[in-house]
Image (tube, rainbow, N blue to C red):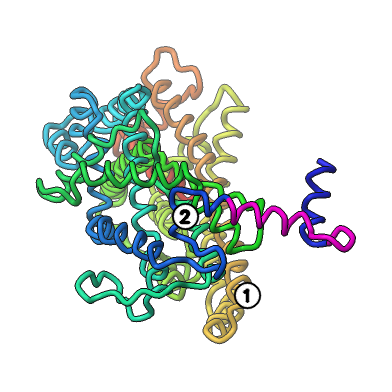
Amino acid sequence: MPDVINKVMSFINRDGEGESEKDILLKQIAKDISQNKYAKFYRVRQQEADISLGQFFYNLYKLVYPMQIFLKDPAKVAKIRQITLEAFLDKKTMDLIKKLSLEAVNENMKAGSDVIKILEDDLAALNAGFDSPRITAADKCHNLIVSIKQFVFFNFSSVIRKFDPEFKEGDFLTQLKFSPVDVTVLASDLSAFLSVLPSMEREDDWKTAFEILKYCKGGTDVIPLAQWTSILSNLADIKQSKILELIARMATGNPILEVKPVILHEALSTKWLENKTNEIRDMINNINDNQRHNQIIALEQSVFGPLATMRLVYYTPEKGKILLEKGLDSSYIYAQPLNHLLIYVQEYLSKEIQELCDILLVRGQWTNNSAFRTMSEAFHEALDTAGEILNLDESLSEEGSNGPRLKGALLRVDRDKTQNRYINSIINTLNDDALDIINKAVPALIVVGKHFKMLLEDCEKKPFELIMNWKELNSVTKVPMSQRIGAVYKKLTLFVQLMTMEKAPSEEE
């Protein structure tokens, strides 16, 4: 390492009164160029690039220009990726891909199949099938095409214009007027060109790569494979001679310049599989969302029927959408379940269920005081949430604790983006409070429901175990107690299912 440092320093500083090591090395490079088979590219005495070097770049550009034009089209590049992958997939994997298409999924849904399970199984099989030598071969072939693209998109025009300033991109008809060029102006171009030379390994399967390109061009060659092979052969000879590397060292004045190739490795199969997996996951999520939406509608109809109307005034889904339309991050995510809870408490819990509980808890002769207290406490805890819901909603009114603050911040948010955080803080607090109310009410209702179930079983037992005077309780109601409890228990169970489904996705957010 010290020797290398000393060498670099000596390029800058002269050793005594003699030539620096840098000058000595540059002279040796000039000598090496003069003895190189491509010595015509560089005029040593004038320190100029000869017009023959310009002709070299021009001829190369003319040969690869059709490939450059073809690969400029993003649609063509996307198709090349797709065809390259499919060219190496076996029939089993291709069949799996077809089964994962939207058309196949829709057919399975029409047939009433368990679409989600089918998708999950097929996706797992697809992932397993991508671990094979065929997939590795697809990646190698794709990267050959990537190396072509990198090479043909080298800025040939810029180099050629340094030999002929009037040269126009893609113009191969106008007569050239090349002149020698001060080699220093080519310094960056030569380094860039050397860094993007295409792959030249013996095992490269250029035949397959060009068959794919031909297929994607509708069956005609972009450029003939034989022509590309000839280009590679010439480039390999140029590379082996090191002429361009030597000229680049002279151009930069750096006798130890090394240009590292830019090797692009695009994991075609990995990226494709990742995109396909995300696509299928989105499809599964959409199916789940649709099924969940349909289940919610069905449960809502079963529980409320025509009563499913909006009771809240301010904390509503519609007003939550307005917040999102203003570009805010938050909305009233628990508005729908909170509204359903209010309806249920007002229309059922405080009427039919309270009347039934009054008979059971006041007139009933319980043998288990612990069960009696548990049911009573759970019922009243759920009943009290109506007031909490209305207080939360009222806080957003003009006279409420949150309404004026939110209204003022919304008026300022267009000109003062810092209000976003303040508004989101208010909304998030409201959402947390709404979720707390729901999380208090639902477990309480579950407890009440469990006791209704136990009482339903008890009233049909002989002898009775929980309540001893079922005959007396039946005498104070027109509808038999078992029938009333059964109807209330059924609707309560459906309502708990509805609340659980409505709040679960928001909790994940």
Q: Earlier in the sequence, mark 1 or mark 2?
A: 2
| Label 1 to label 2: alpha-carbon separation | 86 Å
Q: Is residue 162 magenta?
A: no
Q: Quadrant of the N terminus?
A: top right
> Which residue corresponds to mark 1?
401
Q: Is residue 15 magenta?
A: yes
Residue placed most toward the observer, 391 or 210 = 210
Q: Is residue 299 visible?
A: no
Query: At label 2, which amino acid type do we have?
Result: Ala
1 or 2: mark nearer the eye? 2
- On the image, the x and y values in percent for residue 135 come to 33, 28
Query: At label 1, which amino acid type do we have?
Result: Ser
Residue placed most toward the observer, 67 or 165 = 165
Residue at left 38%, top 53%? 151
> Which residue corresponds to mark 2?
39
- What residue span does the magenta drawing correspond to? 14-31
- On the image, the x and y values in percent for residue 185 come to 53, 71
Q: Is residue 449 above or below residue 293?
A: above
Residue at left 61%, top 79%? 405
Q: Is 295 on the left-hand or right-hand side of 352?
A: left
- On the image, the x and y values in percent for residue 469 come to 46, 25
